[in-house]
Amino acid sequence: MQNISNIQPANRVKDVKEYYFSTKLKEIAKLNAEGADIVSLGVGGPDRPPHPDVVKTLCDEANMPDAHGYQPYVGLPALREAYAAWYAKYFNVELDAATEIQPLIGSKEGILHTTLAFVNPGDGVLIPNPGYPTYTSVSKLAEAEIFTYDLTEEGGWEPDFEALERLPLQKIKLMWVNYPHMPTGKPASKALFEKIVAFGRKHGIVIVNDNPYSFVLHEQQLSILSVAGAKDIAIEMNSLSKSHNMPGWRMGMIASNPQFINWILKVKSNIDSGQFKPMMKAAIQALNADDSWYEAVNKEYRERRKIAERIMEALGCHFDPSQRGLFLWGRIPDSYTDAAQLADEVLYDARVFIVPGFIFGSNGNRYVRLSLCATQDKLNEALRRIKELKH
């Protein structure tokens, strides 16, 4: 047998690392197996179940004899219609359910499919710093040239458009934006979206807004597609993971003009398949939830957020109370070399997992992120342990 050491992976595999949470959660599992009992405030995966009617629909539909076959790549018509109605009701955006919506197996899938649909090897991609790490890793896998753009606390976590104009924009094909922003919690604004759309139109750069956090601790939902003419140049991804407590279901969607959607479908249909029919039926049920569902979800997150703010204060971190979404982002004290030092101290000495901001880019080096996806009891235990550590 040939020595496996002679086999080398493709260059694109050499250029990316295993996802941070994949490696860190293995370490935490090992610590827990040794009796550490780590309180995790890391991953932003909702810990509460979906609406009971959603689960019931899944179970009922799974018992149907026609439930288990292959499904259309474009999803059920009723699912696309439910997404369109959801966007009309909450985002004030009219979408053609037949041509302007594509269901996705989660947003990560959408990042890959969109990148492959628009970016050739060597094309430029604009990625926020700090930002979701998958924008970078997928761009590397597609052999794109990455251009990061700075988001800073001093700049209100918004792009510096004067700095953007100094980049070699003729090389850049795609720009990733993410408002409401992760990890900083910066809310979206119509004025910001107007600037971003105008920038994309001016330079022929496709804008993709990743928008899964609009319903968490937000009073008003906002879509980049609400800007006049945005569909000509902009794409928006959304998801039921955060808004409907369905992260493991992988129910997402992408919306734009029919041509863009068609190009993305060409990629998707050659890589994966349609979603499980009972899950699509259950997603329709979720999208038809009334306002009381969102209020009940946010009532719990508001209570958790209060405890998370006390944890930040116990850590000596500064934070902006206007943040929204599933996380709390805080600037670390000057006494620490970087966020990794603080996060490691808290993990190994207080047995609490918090996320160092460097994983989102160099502009996160002096920040940490707390997830609200832990019970109030867990958050209070984390607070107790950190107070004990610090005093």
Image (cartoon, rainbow, N blue to C red):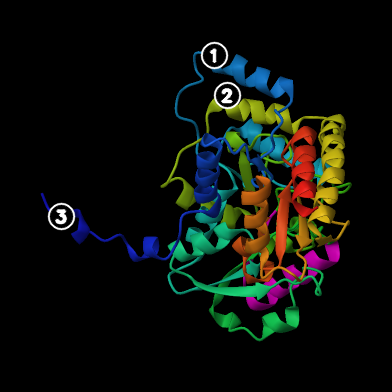
Mark 1 or mark 3, whichever is nearer to me: 3
**Residue linked to disc 3:** 3
Q: Earlier in the sequence, mark 2 or mark 3?
A: 3
For residue 208, say whether it is visible.
no
Label 2: element kind: helix
Say if mark 2 contacts mark 1, CB within 8 Å: yes
Say if mark 2 contacts mark 3, CB within 8 Å: no
Percent position of residue 145, x then y: 49, 74
- Tell me how far mark 2 sits from mark 1, CA to CA: 9 Å
At horizontal 78% and vertical 71% (from top left) the residue drawn is 195
At horizontal 57% and vertical 81% (from top left) the residue drawn is 170
At horizontal 66% and vertical 31% (from top left) the residue drawn is 283
Magenta: main secondary structure equals: helix
The outermost residue toward the left is 1
| 188 with respect to 81 (left or right) | right
Percent position of residue 57, x then y: 65, 19
Determine whether 170 is above or below 229 in the image: below
- Tell me how far mark 2 sits from mark 3, CA to CA: 46 Å
**Residue linked to disc 1:** 64
Q: Earlier in the sequence, mark 2 or mark 1?
A: 1
What residue range appears in magenta? 190-210
Percent position of residue 190, x then y: 84, 62
Q: Amino acid at mark 1?
A: Met
- Tell me how far mark 1 sits from mark 3, CA to CA: 50 Å
Task: Classify 10 Å Cα crowding around label 1: few (below 14), some (14-19), many (20 and above).
Answer: few
Q: Which mark is residue 278?
A: 2
